[in-house]
Amino acid sequence: MNSQFSQHSISQIHFIIKKKMMASTAVSFSSHRPTPAYTMNYPKPNPTNPISLPNSQANRAASDSDPPKFKGSPQLNRWSRARAIRSGRKLERQGQRSQVVEMNPRVQPKESVSSPPTPAAGAPGNEDGEVTTGKSIYMVSDGTGWTVEHAVNAALGQFEHCLVDRGCPVNTHLFSGIDDVERLMEIVKQAAKEGAMLVYTLADPSMAESARQACKLWGIPSTDVLGPITEAVASHLGVSPSGLPRGAPGRKFPLSEEYFKRIEAIEFTIKQDDGALPQNLHKAEIVLAGVSRTGKTPLSIYLSQKGYKVANVPIVIGVELPDTLFEVEPEKVFGLTINPVVLHTIRKARAKSLGFCEEIRSNYSEMDHVRAELEFAGKIFAQNPAWPVIEVTGKAIEETAAVVLRLYHDRKHKCSMPRISKRY
Amino acid sequence: MNSQFSQHSISQIHFIIKKKMMASTAVSFSSHRPTPAYTMNYPKPNPTNPISLPNSQANRAASDSDPPKFKGSPQLNRWSRARAIRSGRKLERQGQRSQVVEMNPRVQPKESVSSPPTPAAGAPGNEDGEVTTGKSIYMVSDGTGWTVEHAVNAALGQFEHCLVDRGCPVNTHLFSGIDDVERLMEIVKQAAKEGAMLVYTLADPSMAESARQACKLWGIPSTDVLGPITEAVASHLGVSPSGLPRGAPGRKFPLSEEYFKRIEAIEFTIKQDDGALPQNLHKAEIVLAGVSRTGKTPLSIYLSQKGYKVANVPIVIGVELPDTLFEVEPEKVFGLTINPVVLHTIRKARAKSLGFCEEIRSNYSEMDHVRAELEFAGKIFAQNPAWPVIEVTGKAIEETAAVVLRLYHDRKHKCSMPRISKRY
């Protein structure tokens, strides 16, 4: 059994997986699986074999035929129970939720994962210069990897309470453009060594199946991000997916209308930044107005990436606003405001980093001036009640962008149920 | 039964769901489910009841106690089989895969979904001005909605072969910031009326459960994007997720180091665009060099959004390149090149849209000039062999960005297994 997992047997594993897939086309695959994953024979740890499982956990997993007890905080157990109820799964049989989440049969230690016990001088984990404290998440994609990265970031947002104080440090590692099974298996093996979990987006069903099976064999928790959605869309449309990664040759239509629209929007937005070319405001789809450091520029750029032509107009005490701002359709103008205390903090940091002289600094970042400028902006907004005013305090760029676009589409389409619609 | 689904019973449904969740804390939830979803009692269609299911499909679903046969192309069936094998699921019992994908029990018609049969003048579907040809996908999020949008876009990438010629037109509708169950239920009802599928990211387990159950009751295919990943991360870290949406008050840390780094990167990149301020090239983390229309600007902006300070330097025949380009570390310089025929096409379109005069136009977009300029760039690249040269023909901005970042991190960290690592 052990030799099957050596460095040179990757194509062999793929062959076995392919054979299994073929053999089970007509019958249920589950007959090939000797009940839950954790009763499978793991490769016995071997300090000279670079792919053997790290330290004594593997021994325990291999010798222990009882399913390991689910460990975690009482809070985690409560939450897991809620999820279990939600998914209609029996609480007593955690090991069976193998469709989406492959539970790691090894008991995860609370402390940092130690470096691989193997004397593998050439192992990437040692060469990277990356400190391996904390749990690792491997993200594998056959394309850009942005989808899997986005999904993992969003999921990690659910653990901010323990990530910010580094109570549970996490390292993510993105492997993009993985389109052959050999490289995939190298990564899975490395994940096993590092005790990482694997999250993947692989369009080719046989690649995805290889990832799933290898993770199961090596006891790596894994999640397929796009499989379930793609499957649901396929049934919904009654059309089969291509099974080809996005970047596959002959698949892209980069000279499409949307591609050009997006580039045009980005170029327009850069040119219009910070009140430049006010005569062009009527050409913008969205106009942002606000005092300095309300995030107009990054917000404009973010929106332009989504294909919207954005102009932004700074509001500064003593500087007259361009007439064109009041001539354009008020439906496309958005005011940005922010808490004065927070703005004061941001401006002080900004003034310091830009090395402003004393006079400019006091005008720009003194609390009285900050308050006065926000009041000045507030009066302009009050005089233009058709402009929605968005409070940006504590919002990430993406969050403000979501509010702007929701309002923009809502007002444009005048629908009773605000939505951003697109046609494909 | 019917009255339970009327306009005014949303809170009632939520109450029922909550009660069910509480009741089943200790026992398996599956005991509450009378076997597969499609044998449940659907609300009987009623043309005067705005929430009844559309047209005769509902009748069929309600009266037919046999599970409907899976319909689709032979290709779809093959693909479904591969997926089924992969997930270890029995092929004969499609209805049981209820954890992630709720199969729509209604047979989906190949032709366009007709508008709701109800005389609901106030129904959003009618007010939008949106043409409802094609299948709809509803994307629901308690946050910005960018994660669910990203995931659905990526999944739709698997159907490009039928989307581009509008063989199977699809409309997506994004509902962001949905943080109360009343609005959630309105959307689910509208999805039922429109025959849409629902893809959601809801951090609060009880909201996600409400979505799942309501979709099941009304026969809407649905997918939970983040649930499986969050669950896997929770077990991996041994920490419970917060269950709070990202934008929830008191959750964000927008004044974090990363936030400022990103804004600084965006502002730097805008200032450096198109060869401006060559004296600052040493401050950039990534420098892009290429002839006009190789996508330097949108690529720079995209990378800056990810927190990298980018400068781009245009290569133009007869214009000397700044000395600083050859003085900075060659590890951070990337050359961009493109197929001359494609570049010629792009430049012709560009010259036309900018209204170039005849002389500039011929210099800019004539085929001979395009070839000569690309050769000129090629020579510069050859003289600087440490710069990787990336072929951008047929690549989307995101794809080129993925290649640049893979190489950038690879060279910076000199790891044997190229990866982009981040610490949280």
Image (tube, coloured by chain):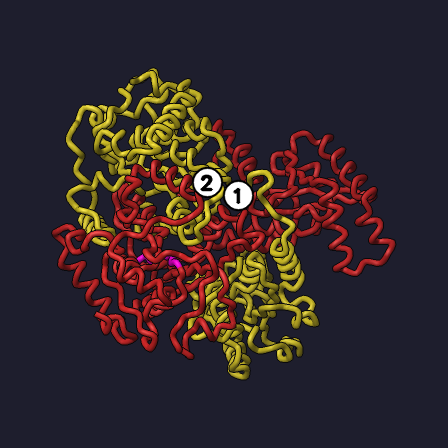
Chain colours: A yellow, B red
Q: Give the side of residue A342 with respect to residue A115, left or right.
A: right
The amino acid type of the residue labelled 2 equals Ala
Residue at label 1?
A: A246
Residue A18: x and y in percent read: 39, 28
Find the magenta span and give its range: B197-204
Residues marked 1 and 2 touching at CB (< 8 Å): yes
Q: Give the side of residue B333 with respect to residue A370, left or right.
A: right
Q: Name the chain under label 2.
A: A
> What predominant SS class does the magenta segment belong to?
strand
Q: Is residue B160 magenta?
A: no
Callout 2: few (<14), some (14-19), or many (20+) C-alpha neighbours within 10 Å? many
The amino acid type of the residue labelled 1 equals Arg
Of all residues, the one furthest to the bottom in this rendering is A383
Residue at label 2?
A: A203
Q: Quick one: SS at disc 2? A: loop
Quarter of the picture containing the N terminus of chain A is top left
Residue B416: x and y in percent read: 49, 27
Residue A213: x and y in percent read: 34, 31
Tell me the residue at 12%/52% (across/down). Answer: B26
Q: Quick one: SS at disc 1? A: loop
Q: Please tell me which of labels 1 and 2 falls first in the chain.
A: 2
